[in-house]
Image: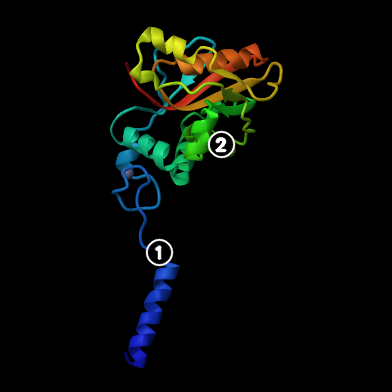
Amino acid sequence: MGLMGQARKFAERLLDLLFPAQSRCVFCTITEGNEMCYNCRQHFFPLRPAQAVPHVSEVMALAYYEGVVRDALHRLKYSGSHELARQLGILSSQLWAGDIGRYDFVTSVPMHRERYIQRGYNQAEFIAREIARTADLPYVSYLIRERDTPPQHSLSHYRRRQNVKDAFSTACPVPYGSRILLVDDILTTGSTVAYCAGVLKGSGAREVGVLVIAYAEL
Ligand SMILES: [Zn+2]
């Protein structure tokens, strides 16, 4: 390679360094661009699930649990992408800004210790921390999961209730009269967040609101 060739090679490397290869939409991983693509963005909007959840004052959701949303949450659960969690946190704060601002603290539905160690992260906590950061609220891990419970969707209605009963307790004192925003990735029956909210209220919280990314209609 001549001097010119070497110079060209060097210039190409420099350009690669200055302008890295186009990244892709973190949701569909297909469309090029640094942020969420137009098509994926269409799946997200403020959504209030119709079902009432005991101990919970309001339920906020961002999407239905289907298609690209389902795939993205699955990826977040099993690959723990920080960028995906970050985008979901920003999106939550954008779509529910006024409502999130009413809360004093953000917390998340906990994962059992053994599973947490196995996986190394809790996707609900990832999202909750990003919401707290973008909304400028403190994040506190108020809850712990005493027992590892089988996935809710694999159980009958009766077993679901038994499944989560007494599975949660508080990890630290809950400020008396506080309003807590409880975050999870998916809402199905609502029994998990209902028990968590019950524990938080029993420990001093005045109000518990729930924010989930996706709502899975039964
Ligand atoms: Zn996309």
Residue 155 visible in this rendered orientation of the protein: yes
Choose between 109 and 56: the one closer to the eye. Answer: 109
Instruction: Check disc 2: other Cα within 10 Å, few if <14, some if 14-19, many if 20+.
Output: many
Left-right relation of 109 to 172: left
Disc number for residue 55 = none
The quarter of the picture where the N terminus appears is bottom left
Residue occupying image coordinates x 52% and y 25%: 109
Identity of the residue drawn at 38% across and 35% down:
73
Q: Say which mark, if any, is on residue 129.
A: 2
The answer to whether residue 120 is above or below residue 53 is below
Pointer 1 residue: 20
Query: At x 62% / y 25%, what residue is drawn?
Result: 142
Q: Residues within 10 Å of mark 1 (few under 14, many from 20)?
A: few
Residue 99's image quarter?
top right
| Image-quadrant location for residue 218 | top left
What is the secondary structure assignment of the residue under circle 1? loop
